[in-house]
Image (spheres, helix red, strand yellow):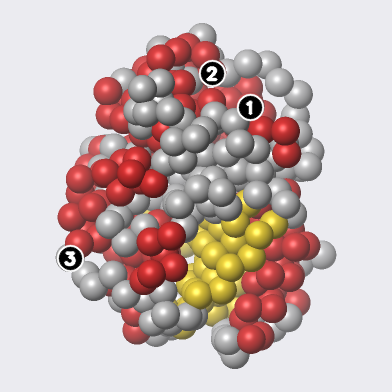
C-alpha cells in the first residue's frame, strides 16, 4: 500500500491542502481534479506513478476539501486558480511539472500550459479538451453536435447547465446540498454505452427547472463502487457536508472572465500534450462531435487515446488511464 502524506501549502492569498507520495527527488506530476471531486480521486494514479519513481502531488482545488474557499463567486475564475497552482509549484520547490487534469482540472492545466509554458514539461487532460477560446459557452456551443441536439430544442446543447448556474446559482447549490450523500451517489456513476449518441441530462436543466429533473434534491440511487470505494464515498460526503457546494459551483459562473484570460495569451501549445477521450461521456463528448477539433489545430505535439469509459475516467478505468499516461510520458521522455 502506498502511503499518502497530507500537506498544506499556504500563502497570504490561498491555502492548498494536497496529497503527496513518491520520492521527493523524482520527476514531478501534479494531478488536478474537477467538479465535484477531491484530491483522493487520483488515488490510483498517485500510487501507480509513485511506484515508478515519480513525485506525485494532488491538491484539493480552491473551494474544495481542505483548501481555502473564498466567499465571492468571482474568486473562482481560472486566473485565480492558475495562481493557486503556481504557488503550489513554488511551495514544492519546483520550476516545472507534468500537469494532469480531469473535468474542470482540464481547463485549469490547459491555462497553466498556455500562460506559463516554462512551468509545464507536459500537459494531459481526461475528458475536457483544450479550447483555445476559453472553456466558456461562447466557445463550446458552436461545437455542439446538432444531430444529437437540434438547435430549436436544445439551443445550448449539453452545456445548458452552465447558463443555468448563472441564472439560478442558489437553487442549484441548494439542490446539491439538500441530501449530500444522495448527490454524491447520483453524480459518480459508471459510463453506459447505451447513452452514446443520446442527449445528456445536462441539456434539459433549464427546461426541467433544475438539476435531477427539477425535484430539488438528488434521487436515491445505489452507491456505484466502480467509481468510488466505500471509504472514498464517505470521504466525499464528509467533505461536501462540511464545505457545501458554493465554491465548486462558482467555478461555472465566470465564463466572460475565463474567456478574457484565455485571450490574454497566445493559444499555441508547443509542449507534449495528451488527451484522453472518454467514449461514453455524454457531456464532454469528444469522439463523434467537433469538440476536440480546436485542440488539434493549436497543439504542436498532440497524442490522443480513446478509452471505453464514462466521465469518471481516472476512477472507472484506472489501469487503462495509468497505462496511457505512462506510455505517453515514456514516448515523450518526461522523466
- Image quarter of residue 322: bottom right
234 relative position to 82: left or right: right
Q: At 59% across and 61% down in the image, what residue appears?
A: 276
Tags 3 and 2 touching, CB below 8 Å:
no
Nearer to the camera, 291 or 218: 291
- Choose the circle earlier in sequence order: 3 or 2: 2
Q: At 72% across and 52% down in the image, what residue appears?
A: 308
Tags 1 and 3 touching, CB below 8 Å:
no
Pointer 1: what residue? 186
268 relative position to 5: left or right: left
Q: Residues within 10 Å of mark 2 (few under 14, many from 20)?
A: some
From the top left corner, tell me how far across and down residue 144 is, in percent.
42, 41
From the top left corner, tell me how far across and down residue 248 is, in percent.
41, 39
- Choose the circle earlier in sequence order: 1 or 2: 1
Q: Residues within 10 Å of mark 1 (few under 14, many from 20)?
A: some
Tell me the CA gap for discs 1 and 2. 9 Å
Nearer to the camera, 130 or 46: 130
Check the image and name the residue furthest to the top: 215
Q: Which mark is residue 212?
A: 2
Q: At 63% across and 27% down in the image, what residue appears?
A: 186
Pointer 3: what residue? 264
- Choose the circle earlier in sequence order: 1 or 3: 1
Which of pointers 1 and 3 indicates the residue nearer the eye? Answer: 3
Tags 1 and 2 touching, CB below 8 Å:
yes
246 relative position to 243: left or right: left
Label 2's element? helix
Q: At 46% across and 40% down in the image, what residue appears?
A: 145
Q: Which mark is residue 177?
A: none
Tell me the CA gap for discs 1 and 3. 38 Å
Q: Quadrant of the N terminus?
A: bottom right
Label 3's element? loop
Amino acid at each position: 500500500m502506498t502511503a499518502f502524506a497530507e500537506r498544506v501549502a499556504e500563502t497570504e492569498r490561498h491555502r492548498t491542502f494536497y496529497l503527496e507520495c513518491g520520492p521527493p527527488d523524482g520527476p514531478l506530476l501534479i494531478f488536478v481534479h474537477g467538479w465535484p471531486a477531491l484530491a483522493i480521486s487520483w488515488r490510483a494514479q498517485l500510487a501507480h506513478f509513485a511506484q515508478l519513481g515519480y513525485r506525485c502531488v494532488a491538491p484539493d482545488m480552491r473551494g474544495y476539501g481542505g483548501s481555502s474557499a473564498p466567499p465571492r463567486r468571482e474568486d473562482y475564475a481560472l486566473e485565480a486558480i492558475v495562481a493557486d497552482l503556481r504557488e503550489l509549484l513554488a511551495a514544492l520547490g519546483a520550476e516545472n511539472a507534468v500537469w494532469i487534469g480531469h473535468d474542470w482540472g482540464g481547463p485549469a492545466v490547459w491555462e497553466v500550459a498556455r500562460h506559463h509554458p516554462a512551468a509545464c514539461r507536459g500537459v494531459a487532460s481526461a475528458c475536457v479538451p483544450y479550447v483555445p477560446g476559453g472553456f466558456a459557452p461562447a466557445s463550446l456551443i458552436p461545437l455542439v453536435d446538432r444531430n444529437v441536439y437540434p438547435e430549436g430544442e436544445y439551443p445550448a446543447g449539453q452545456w445548458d447547465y452552465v447558463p443555468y448556474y448563472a441564472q439560478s446559482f442558489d437553487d442549484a447549490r441548494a439542490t446539491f446540498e439538500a441530501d449530500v450523500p444522495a448527490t454524491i451517489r447520483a453524480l459518480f456513476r459508471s459510463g453506459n454505452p447505451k447513452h452514446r449518441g443520446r442527449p445528456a441530462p445536462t441539456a434539459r436543466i433549464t427546461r426541467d427547472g433544475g438539476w435531477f429533473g427539477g425535484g430539488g434534491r438528488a434521487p436515491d440511487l445505489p452507491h456505484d463502487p466502480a467509481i468510488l470505494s466505500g471509504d472514498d464515498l464517505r470521504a466525499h460526503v464528509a467533505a461536501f457536508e462540511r464545505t457545501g457546494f458554493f465554491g465548486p459551483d462558482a467555478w461555472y459562473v465566470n465564463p466572460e472572465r475565463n474567456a478574457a484570460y484565455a485571450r490574454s495569451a497566445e493559444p499555441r501549445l508547443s509542449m507534449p500534450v495528451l488527451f484522453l477521450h472518454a467514449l461514453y461521456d455524454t457531456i464532454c463528448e469528444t469522439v463523434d462531435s467537433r469538440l476536440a477539433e480546436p485542440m488539434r489545430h493549436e497543439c504542436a505535439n498532440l497524442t490522443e487515446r480513446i478509452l471505453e469509459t464514462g466521465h469518471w475516467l481516472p476512477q472507472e478505468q484506472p489501469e487503462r488511464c495509468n497505462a496511457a499516461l505512462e506510455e505517453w510520458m515514456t514516448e515523450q521522455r518526461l522523466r
